[in-house]
Amino acid sequence: MNKVILMGRLTRDPEVRYTQGDNSLCIANFSIAVDRRYNRNSQDGATADFINCVAFGKLAEHVEKYYRKGLKTALTGRIQTRNYTNRDGQKVYVTEVVAEELEFAESKNASAAGNGGNSYGGGYSGSGNGNYGGGYGGNNGGSYGNAGGYSAPAQNTAPASDALDGFMNIPDGIDEELPFS
């Protein structure tokens, strides 16, 4: 099995090109920075891996239209290796992730603000199962979403302690209304 799931931010604007011929194909190359959880050699404990990615066809056109440097994305794909001989006659080996599904990992507002916090953008990028609020469904029959999913409210009305743990505060006295016990 060859399956990769990544979440990170684009390190640069995607490079997009089209193949020549009657059936031209869109190809988008981009890289994402994926945070590591911990590194002993780093003073602040944070470091990142920079992963080269490529998308083809309709997915590449989606990348060309909507993706920019700094955008947080969730990607599903596969690892691919290839090699070629460059102009100097040296053999070059390339390992990259071929994107099969992409999702926005934060709301448009959070992306524009650059806060990197929790958000609710993106959506389901299924393989022919429909679309639930944004994202692009890859090569297997998904569809373009409407407005990129649910956007977080402009103001956080929850207490600060709720924002830190990521869970919603359920008020007391509504136990009978909940569908579970």
Image: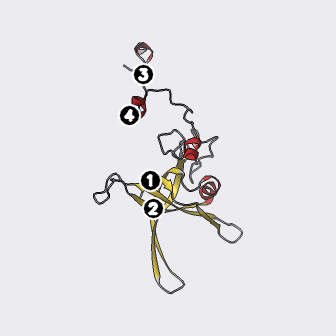
Q: Are marks 1 and 2 in contact (CB under 8 Å)?
A: yes
Q: Please tell me which residue lies in front, 82 or 171.
A: 171
Q: According to the image, label 4 marks what residue?
A: 165
Q: Name the residue rendered at 42%, 24% in the picture.
A: 169
User: Which label's residue is closer to the chain start, 1 or 2?
Assistant: 1
**Separation of residues labelled 2 and 3 (CA atoms):** 40 Å
User: Which label's residue is closer to the chain start, 4 or 2?
Assistant: 2
Horizontal and vertical percent for residue 10? 52, 56
Horizontal and vertical percent for residue 16? 62, 64
Q: With respect to residue 150, does 20 lie above or below?
A: below
Q: Mark on residue 170?
A: 3
In the picture provided, is 172 more to the left or to the right than 26? Answer: left
Local crowd size for mark 2, using a 10 Å CA cut-off: few (<14), some (14–19), many (≥20): some
Amino acid type, label 3: Ile
Q: Please tell me which residue lies in front, 65 or 80.
A: 65
**Separation of residues labelled 1 and 2 (CA atoms):** 9 Å
Horizontal and vertical percent for residue 152? 54, 35
Say which of marks 3 and 1 sits in front.
Answer: 3
User: Which label's residue is closer to the chain start, 3 or 4?
Assistant: 4
Q: Please tell me which residue lies in front, 62 or 153.
A: 153
Report if residue 90 is visible in the image.
yes
Amino acid type, label 2: Ile
Amino acid type, label 4: Asp
**Separation of residues labelled 4 and 2 (CA atoms):** 29 Å
Q: Quadrant of the C terminus?
A: top left
Q: According to the image, label 1 marks what residue?
A: 6
User: Which label's residue is closer to the chain start, 3 or 1?
Assistant: 1
**Separation of residues labelled 4 and 1 (CA atoms):** 23 Å
Say which of marks 4 and 2 sits in front.
Answer: 4
Horizontal and vertical percent for residue 156? 50, 30
